[in-house]
Amino acid sequence: MRKAALLGLCMIVSGCAGFDKFVSDTATLPGENPNATTGDELNMRRIRGQSAVDVPILPEGGNMWPGPPTPLPTLEDVEKDRSGTVLGGDAATGPQLPDGEEMSIGEKEDIRHGVIGGGTAGKLPDAEPDVSSKYGAHRGVGAPIEIPNDDGTITLIQPDGSVSTIKDNRSTVHH
């Protein structure tokens, strides 16, 4: 029974893809070098010392390189193809923009008459209103900026730019 199971196992495993690679990498016949290189290419025959005759590469007749690429068209060529003449226009494309002119869809006129920017005749406000009181900033003018630190101190930034650090006496830590 064991021999039949072993034979059945060998039959099943031999059907697996890569089993022959596994066997050839792990088992060799007696007298063979397990570290010998494998393969039958030209260089492998040379490594083993066998005769290796290779066919030399011979030149072929004719020019195998393509000719020079066609030059890219200039803008003048493209314009000639589109309208027929260099500076003229036709009914399909409309009139051409003369040299030195600018394209506009009317925004310059709106700026001159103050339509853009709130309609105040083109004049911007001198200053923006201070809305910091809406957001909880109740500092007086000239008051320092207070930045609390994790070590129980406060960093003060004065309006003149000077910086100082003081001990925070307002908070007490209870353990």
Image: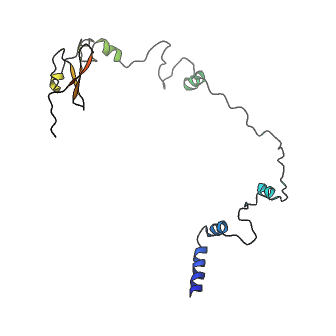
Residue at x 37%, y 20% (from the top left corner): 105
Q: In which quarter of the image is the N terminus?
A: bottom right
Q: Quadrant of the C terminus?
A: top left
Task: Report the front residue among 5 and 26.
Answer: 26
The relative height of residue 159 versus residue 70 in the rendered view (above or below) is above
Q: How is the image coloured?
A: rainbow
Q: In this view, does 119 lie to the left or right of 11?
A: left
Residue at x 42%, y 18% (from the top left corner): 103
Q: In this view, does 89 lie to the left or right of 162?
A: right
Task: Report the front residue among 66 and 32.
Answer: 32
The relative height of residue 66 versus residue 166 in the rendered view (above or below) is below
Q: Is residue 55 left or right of residue 67?
A: right
Q: Where is residue 133 in the image (x, y as percent from the top left)?
A: 15, 23
Q: Where is residue 81 in the image (x, y as percent from the top left)?
A: 58, 26
Residue located farthest toward the front when viewing the structure as drawn: 175
Residue at x 59%, y 68% (from the top left corner): 17
Q: In which quarter of the image is residue 28?
A: bottom right
Q: Quadrant of residue 106?
A: top left
Q: Position of residue 31 (x, y in %)?
A: 76, 70
Task: Report the front residue among 15 and 157.
Answer: 157
Q: In which quarter of the image is residue 159?
A: top left
